[in-house]
Structure formats: C-alpha cells, structure tokens
Image (tube, rainbow, N blue to C red):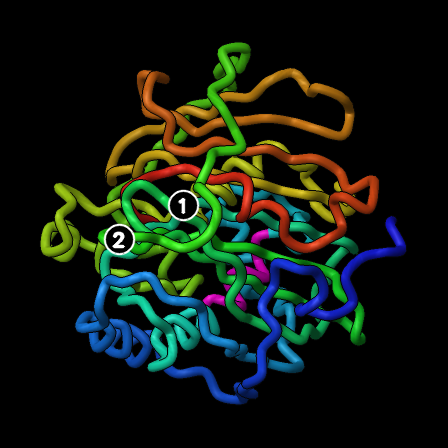
C-alpha cells in the first residue's frame, strides 16, 4: 500500500481549502433534505466559484445489518465485507447539506450526476467508525453547463482510507468555469456480454430505503413524469454497485486497495432488463466493464477497476480536471 496517501481532505492542489467546517451530529430526514432542495430552485444559472465550505460527521459506524441489506439490493455475494461504494451512501446526506446550503451557487433540481471516482486505500471492516468530510472540488466547463465536484474523504483513526469524487452537471450555465470537460473512458468493442439482469419496477424504492436517496425520479411513474421521465429511473450509484458486485471477488475485502471509476451515459428505465459487459483483464490489476440496455447497443455506464499501486493513484483529484462524460440524471 502506498505510504503517500493523502492525510487530510484539503491535501492536493485541486481540493478546496474550507474556511468553514460545519460539524454534523444529527442528520435531517430525507424529506427535510428534499424540501431544502426544492427551495434552491430560484438560484440563478450563472457561473460562480464554489464556496469554501465543508461538512464533517464524526464517529460514523459501518453497521453490519445495513451493509447486508445494501449488499442484497445491489447483488453482492455473502460474505461480502464492506462494498467500496458504501461510504458514498453514508456521506450522501452531507452532499445534500452542502448542495442545499445558501452559499452553494447552483439549484439542485434537474442536476445531472455525471461520474464517480472512488479510491480505497485500506480494507474497511464492519463496526469500523469513520470521520466523513464533504467539500467542494474543482470546476469543469461542459457544453451544456457547469460541472462541479463534491469530494468526500473518509478517515479511520485520523488516517485517510477512502476518497470519493462525485461529478455533477448544472445545465444552462453560460460561460462555465474550469477546464473543458472530457470523458476518460471510451467505448471498447472488445467487451463481451457476461450477464443479463432484470431491473424490477420497485427497484428504485428498494434502493431508496437503504440509501436514503428518495429523489422522485426514482420512485413512481407519476413522480418521474413530473420531472420529464417516461418511467422511473434507477439510481446511478445502484448501477455502479451492481456492476462492481460482478467484477470484485465475493469477499470484497480481498480485492485490496483500489481505484474505481464510473461514467454514467444514459438512464436505466424501470422496469426492464440490462446487460453486463466486461473485457478480459488488461492485466491482473485492471478491468473495464459496461452496463448496457437489453439489446447491448446503448451504454448506461462505463467503468474501470484497478488496484492502487503507486503515488499517482493515491493523490487526490486529477480526475475532474481531465475526464468526464454526459447523461440525463441519476444521483
């Protein structure tokens, strides 16, 4: 394992130094958070720098029962250890607090989830307790608006064990700030079909119950139609977790430190079927994969898993300034 892993969430040139760190001891209910999101709808769609704001929650337990329920919904085998996507769910309420804060420049409604990168530097164990720090990362310019990054850092005993970068697009912003937005993962014709998975009509509600993400676009046909979707769409992070469940060993703790990247392409409508495509490992330490529609022609996401083997993987965030993609909406 590299010894030069970042020791503080503000290490590195691309992560904002927060002058305001707000301690969170009580998490608002999902309903309260979504009411806050509705209240952001009047924010103007103009390019602005990100606020020097962070939210921190200490002593967050990795609860075995919650993880087991998550593993079942996302297709992880038992025993599964702690899936590398689990800390993202623990941090999601802090994401909501950040993006609904008065100082945050963009409205939340209609925001598009573009990509996620996860770097896990050590095995996570059930009953571990983490300190989660969520703050703003770099901006990128997209032809449809402004891309921004939310960076989550998880520490165990004051050592960074996990970093997640969530990239979102606020459409309609003119003269966007930052370097141009570019995709890092391209179509790979060598991938072969490995599985077909059903995605039932209630999958969004199943995932919402364990994740706390009750965005209406994921729940019911009527609520999805209110936001422009013909049918509910599944959460992008479910799709990411489901593909990782097929890529990682049954005991995910055996996979070791890893660098995971996903770029969301098109939403998965519920109900339906999706197909999982993977390539032969480029080397023992890397695998590319895709989630596609039932016919195998339309990509829903592209992903890459690789082991962490050097300082370049350990340093925070080079991804958002050099790599991204586009899609219609999925937190």
Q: Is residue 285 above or below residue 140?
A: above
Q: Is residue 218 visible?
A: no
Q: Residues within 10 Å of mark 1 (few under 14, many from 20)?
A: many
Q: Secondary structure at mark 1?
A: strand
Which residue is painted at 68% across and 73% down in the image? 130
| Disc 1 to disc 2: CB gap under 8 Å | no
Q: Is residue 280 visible?
A: yes
Which residue is painted at 62% across and 42% down in the image? 260
- Of the residues under marks 1 and 2, which one precedes in the sequence? 1
Q: CA distance from mark 1 to mark 2?
A: 18 Å
Q: Which mark is residue 157?
A: none
Give the image location of residue 115, x and y in percent. 46, 45
Left or right? Give the position of 123 relative to 177.
right
Q: Residues within 10 Å of mark 2 (few under 14, many from 20)?
A: some
Q: Quadrant of the C terminus?
A: bottom left
Left or right? Give the position of 107 relative to 91.
left
Q: Which mark is residue 114?
A: 1
> What number of labels is visible?
2
Task: State the image quarter where residue 292 is shown.
Answer: top left
Q: Secondary structure at mark 2?
A: loop
Left or right? Give the position of 65 relative to 169.
right
Question: Is the stretch drawn in magenta largely helix, strand or loop?
Answer: helix
Q: Is residue 244 above or below residue 21?
A: above
The residue carrying mark 2 is: 174
Which residue is painted at 64% across and 66% down in the image? 153
Furthest toward the top, the residue is 190
Question: Which residues are the magenta region?
Answer: 85-92
Q: Is residue 279 above or below residue 122?
A: above
Left or right? Give the position of 279 relative to 273.
right
Give the image location of residue 9, x and y in percent. 67, 68
């Amino acid at each position: 394992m590299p010894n030069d892993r970042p020791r503080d969430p503000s290490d590195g040139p691309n992560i904002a130094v927060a002058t305001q760190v707000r301690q969170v001891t009580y998490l608002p209910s999902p309903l309260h958070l979504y009411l806050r999101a509705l209240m952001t709808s009047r924010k103007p769609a103009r390019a602005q720098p990100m606020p020097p704001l962070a939210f921190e929650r200490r002593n967050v337990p990795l609860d075995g029962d919650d993880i087991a329920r998550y593993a079942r919904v996302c297709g992880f085998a038992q025993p599964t250890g702690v899936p590398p996507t689990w800390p993202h769910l623990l941090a999601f309420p802090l994401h909501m607090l950040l993006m609904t804060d008065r100082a945050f420049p963009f409205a939340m409604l209609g925001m598009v989830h573009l990509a996620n990168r996860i770097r896990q530097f050590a095995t996570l164990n059930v009953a571990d307790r983490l300190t989660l720090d969520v703050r703003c990362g770099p901006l990128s310019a997209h032809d449809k608006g402004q891309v921004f990054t939310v960076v989550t850092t998880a520490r165990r005993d004051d050592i960074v064990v996990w970093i997640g970068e969530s990239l979102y697009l606020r459409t309609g912003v003119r003269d966007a700030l930052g370097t141009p937005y570019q995709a890092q993962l391209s179509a790979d014709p060598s991938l072969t079909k490995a599985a077909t998975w059903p995605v039932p009509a209630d999958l969004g509600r199943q995932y919402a119950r364990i994740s706390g993400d009750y965005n209406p676009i994921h729940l019911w046909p009527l609520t999805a139609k209110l936001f422009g979707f013909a049918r509910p769409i599944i959460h992008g992070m479910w799709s990411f977790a489901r593909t990782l469940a097929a890529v990682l060993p049954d005991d995910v703790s055996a996979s070791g430190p890893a660098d995971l990247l996903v770029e969301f392409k098109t939403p998965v409508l519920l109900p339906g079927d999706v197909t999982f495509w993977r390539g032969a490992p480029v080397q023992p330490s890397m695998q590319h994969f895709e989630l596609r529609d039932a016919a195998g022609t339309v990509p829903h996401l592209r992903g890459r898993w690789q082991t962490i083997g050097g300082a370049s993987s350990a340093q925070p965030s080079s991804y958002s300034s050099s790599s991204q993609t586009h899609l219609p909406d999925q937190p």
